[in-house]
Amino acid sequence: MASDKFSPVLEVGFVQSSSRARAYVRRFQARRFVFTIRVGSVRRKVVQVLFIKSDGSLCVSFPYFDVTDGIASMLCLPAGLRQAEVSLLTHGKLTSRRVKYVHHPDGEVHFSQTGRVRTASSKKSLPLAEAEGHVFSLYVQGLSHFQQTQLGKDDLPPKLKRTVLDFRLDNSTPEAIKISGRWYEAKTLVTRAGAGTYGPTAPAQRPDGSVVPTFLIGPP
């Protein structure tokens, strides 16, 4: 028997409880996603999102940044304030290696690097089975410090092990960018599809009314 051919997009169908209409959620599927920022013809790799097969953990890593020294810290931001002064040093840990953010299925979250940086800053969050909404945000300033994409490797079609997705900007390099990750069940997203199809790319509206691009992704 021939093996099934890998499809980079997974489609899940639902029946709307109110109208009984059929709706579909479509998402990219891979074990590792690499997100790039494309400004004109220049593409820079900014962040990886990984789904760990062994235990279902979600990982966010930044291997493309040319600076390795940093501070991993936990802090609390007061609710409802547009501005607040915080110190990364108070509870921070210095590192000379790039670390990754890990959210385990049981809700344990921390920064570490397997075999190189032990887990020193951790806390308890919601288990992934109960999580709904925001799970991380990445703020980037200085895109020139991130690796450009490589001919061949980063132009390959989406695969099970690795898929590259581009955020396309206009021809002016922004001073800073923000990438947010949100976690939803497919049945939550299907309410936005109506009787049609939602994803794997979709516009999202922010509280100020502006619209930003989004990708729907998930493990195989």
Image (cartoon, helix red, strand yellow):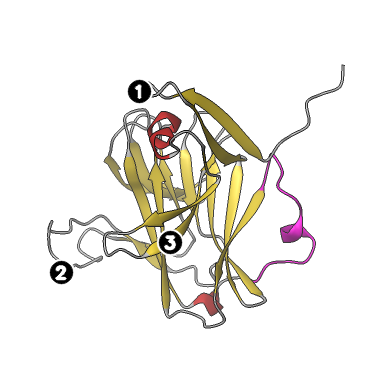
Q: Provide residue 15's location: percent of width, then percent of height.
A: 46, 22
Frontmost residue, 197 versus 20: 20
The Cα–Cα distance between marks 3 and 2, rounded to whole angstroms, is: 25 Å
Sequence order check: which comes first, mark 2 or mark 1? 1
Question: Residue at coordinates 48% horizontally, 24% vertically from top-left?
Answer: 14
Label 3 vs label 1, nearer the camera: 1
| Amino acid type assigned to the residue bearing label 3 in the image | Val
| Amino acid type assigned to the residue bearing label 1 in the image | Ser
Is residue 151 inside the magenta stretch?
A: yes
Figure label count: 3
Frontmost residue, 196 versus 88: 196
Q: Tell me the tag on residue 106.
A: none
Q: Tell me the tag on residue 84.
A: 2
Q: Main secondary structure of the magenta part?
A: loop
The quarter of the rendered structure image containing the C terminus is top right
Sequence order check: which comes first, mark 3 or mark 1? 1
The Cα–Cα distance between marks 3 and 1, rounded to whole angstroms, is: 29 Å
Is residue 113 rendered to the left or right of residue 75?
Answer: right
User: Which residue is farthest right?
Assistant: 1
The residue where tag 3 is placed is 212
